[in-house]
Amino acid sequence: MAPPISRNQLKKLTQRLRAGTETPQDLHALADVLLHYRQVLERAYAEAARLCAEVQHAEPMAPRVKTLKTTMEKLHRQPGLHSLAQIRDLAGLRVVVHGSRTDQDELAALIGAELSDAGRPPKLIDRRADPRSGYRAVHLEVGREGVLIEVQVRTTLQHRWAEVFERTADRLGRGLRYGEQVPLTAGAGVLLSTLAEISEIIDTVERGVDPVPGHTVRAEIVRVLARVRQPPGAATMTNVIHVVLVYRREAGELLVQESFADGDTAMRRQFELERVPEYADTEVAVLSADSEQTLRETHGRYFFTAAELAQRLTDAVSAA
């Protein structure tokens, strides 16, 4: 399927969006571009789901396209971007590996080879070797049907840790997710240090260089996680559902949850809600999966409290 506008038109649209000179027609064009990305992403997700079914120790998570609001934020945060087509995570999906780091590496290589367009090898970014604020995973930048898709391949522990960190960033400042300086209270600083400590312990365990027996390491993670739970002051794309959420980050409050059978309809509803004045300071998202239970697994920060997310990480550690 051809994109709704040409590459040159997309560059010019990007320039107007960044300059703040966009017209209502430009916003409609942006919505069409995001819809196109969603359609390409759905096909990529179906392929990833097939690969996961073959290896049996991995599961694909809900695919997602950035919202109008977060797309605009990205443009202003990265002035070097000349076109929306350069945004590596405008469309993305996630895979969680219930296995070792060797399994993680093998699946990342398989997904990169199968999802990429011919003649365009994927770019691999190893956030295990170069973590960001404690975040670890393997990222792939895959070119498919002319669209750049980010694929996050995480182990179970990496995923559970990321859920806790993302929920923490919702409360303390979203800039934490991008390495930005965010004003913090002393208690918040302790909380982030605790999360960083947990990330280091998980990394040590997953690399198989435990300085002490595994059960002791797991007990140590559980002990540290207790501080997180009490912070200072604080398949496939068949029969899929598409859920539109309105989420107030700072309060961790889910304001709206609507389900749709059609992804395009859900995305258009998302665009409508983003224009509602009372939702100006909220996150409006579309999540797609085969069930609401899957969504709770893939994007737990919308559905669970910080304490519940920490408990989920504790449970995953105990089962490791």
Image: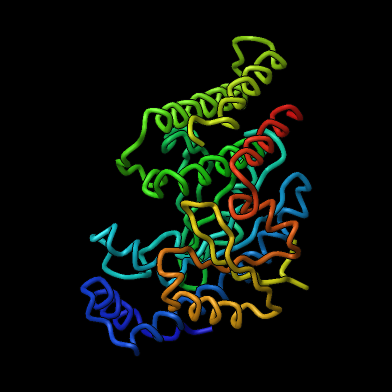
Image quadrant holding the N terminus, namely bottom right
257 and 161: which one is in front? 257
Residue 102 in sight here: no
Q: Residue 99's spot in the image, x, y percent?
A: 71, 36
Residue 265, percent from left and from top = 60, 83
The coloring applied to the image is: rainbow
The quadrant where residue 28 appears? bottom left
Is residue 18 toward the left or the right of residue 104 in the image? left
Query: Residue 40 lies in what quarter of the image?
Result: bottom right
Which is nearer the eye, 72 or 247? 247
Q: Position of residue 147 (x, y in %)?
A: 47, 70
Q: Quadrant of the C terminus?
A: top right
Q: State which quadrant residue 227 falls in.
A: top right
| Relative depth, front residue between 178 and 235 | 178
Q: Decide: is 307 above or below 320.
A: below
Establish if 8 lies above or below 226. below
Give the residue drawn at x 26%, y 68%.
82
168 on left or right of 316 = left
As drawn, which residue projects farthest toward the bottom?
A: 25
Return the residue nearer the eye: 257 or 8.
257
Q: Residue 130 appears at what percent x and percent y? A: 42, 35
